[in-house]
Image (tube, helix red, strand yellow):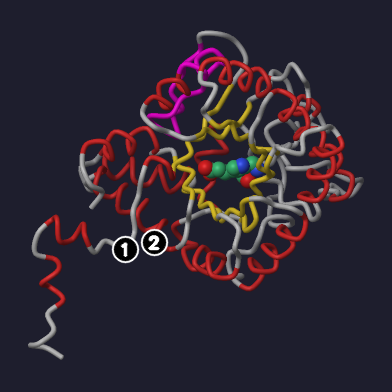
């Protein structure tokens, strides 16, 4: 008891604080999302995600090379197709923009991990994550083989991990068996396990042009009010063969991250989503927040809550800051 005990003793100098720090953040924890679009030599800033760019495959490769040299372990690819249709068929085109970008990245930076988002919403004319049935509802079972084709097309182009973000039931098993049957047993699955129907995806939907044309995603993404259901999703994804689980969004869902960290032995990822990024950027641009300190505090807190891996639009800045000095 005080005055014998004095926790402040260990906070006195930076080296003392460093010695007793419980959580570490390093470049090795970060994954950077990239938005790839058709063409060449395209590098266009995304208005809703300042500091992030729409990139053609050649420019995505150059960005990947640059970030790999700064110590980034991997990127997560999202594609903006040339054209959309009812079933989202460009999503599994072998010559599609994502396979092109995978090949360019693998040539430019062979060791950089290439993860790909597997979903239909950027590719369907209606903007939903799966096929619509005659009542206009997303047809779970009819969507599974299409998602499997998308995953196989990414694996064939050289993806290291595929990441289904659609929230159909049974998609992890469907992807695993299709990948194995196509000879891609070594390609891993990072499942968007607890993906909530969140308003924090707003800036992304503008960036990826994937807002639903009618209705919303509450019929397949999780209800933000639910906690136990995330554990159930985690158990199902694990049984179906997921290699990595993910919680998304991150900041308003730290309790879910902590739950899954404690109840699962799989590596756990947190997706620090577009709205979380946009809030920090907007406040920093007005001088209301110290961007560097806030970003490193957020990323450290995601690690403390239980994330092994953090997918974040702040990755390029964070790599630079981490190379300069300790996080907090
Ligand atoms: C596609 C997908 C979305 C995000 C990742 N994959 C949008 C959505 O589900 O509406 C959001 C990412 C972000 O906000 O940063 N299904």
Q: Are marks 2 and 1 in contact (CB under 8 Å)?
A: yes
Quadrant the N terminus occupies: bottom left
- Which residue is painted at 71% across and 29% down in the image? 154
> Does residue 189 appear in this view?
yes
Q: How many marks?
A: 2
Q: Whereabouts is ligand 1, in terms of quadrant? A: top right
Label at residue 257: none
The percent position of residue 89, horizontal first and vertical second, equals 81, 27
**Dot 2 lies on which element?**
helix
> Does residue 202 appear in this view?
no
Residue closest to the far right: 134
Determine which residue is flagged by label 1: 22
The percent position of residue 308, horizontal first and vertical second, equals 48, 53
Determine which residue is flagged by label 2: 304
**Dot 1 lies on which element?**
loop
Residue 125: image quadrant is top right
Q: Residues within 10 Å of mark 1 (few under 14, many from 20)?
A: few
User: Which region is colored magenta?
Assistant: 42-62
């Amino acid at each position: 008891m005080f005055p014998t005990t004095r926790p402040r003793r260990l906070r006195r100098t930076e080296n003392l604080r460093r010695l007793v720090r419980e959580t570490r953040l390093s470049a090795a924890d970060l994954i950077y999302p990239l938005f790839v679009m058709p063409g060449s030599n395209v590098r266009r800033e995304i208005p809703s995600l300042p500091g992030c760019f729409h990139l053609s495959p050649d420019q995505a490769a150059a960005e990947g090379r640059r970030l790999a040299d700064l110590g980034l372990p991997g990127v997560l690819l999202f594609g903006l197709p040339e054209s959309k249709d009812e079933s989202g068929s460009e999503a599994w085109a072998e010559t599609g923009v994502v396979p092109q970008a995978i090949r360019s990245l693998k040539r430019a930076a062979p060791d950089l991990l290439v993860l790909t988002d597997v979903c239909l919403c950027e590719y369907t004319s209606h903007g939903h994550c799966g096929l619509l049935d005659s009542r206009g509802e997303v047809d779970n079972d009819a969507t599974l083989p299409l998602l499997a084709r998308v995953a196989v097309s990414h694996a064939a182009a050289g993806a290291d991990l595929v990441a289904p973000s659609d929230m159909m039931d049974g998609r992890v098993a469907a992807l695993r068996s299709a990948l194995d049957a196509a000879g891609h047993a070594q390609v891993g699955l990072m499942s968007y396990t607890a993906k909530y129907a969140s308003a924090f995806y707003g800036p992304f939907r503008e960036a990826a042009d994937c807002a639903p044309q009618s209705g919303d995603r509450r019929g397949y993404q999780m209800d933000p009010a639910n906690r136990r259901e995330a554990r159930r999703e985690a158990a199902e994804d694990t049984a179906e063969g997921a290699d990595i689980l993910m919680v998304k969004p991150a900041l308003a869902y730290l309790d879910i991250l902590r739950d899954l960290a404690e109840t699962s032995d799989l590596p756990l990822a947190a997706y620090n989503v577009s709205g979380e990024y946009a809030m920090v950027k907007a406040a920093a641009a007005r001088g209301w927040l110290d961007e560097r300190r806030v970003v490193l505090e957020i990323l450290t807190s995601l690690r403390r809550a239980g994330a092994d891996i953090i997918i974040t639009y702040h990755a390029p800045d964070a790599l630079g800051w981490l190379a300069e000095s300790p996080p907090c």
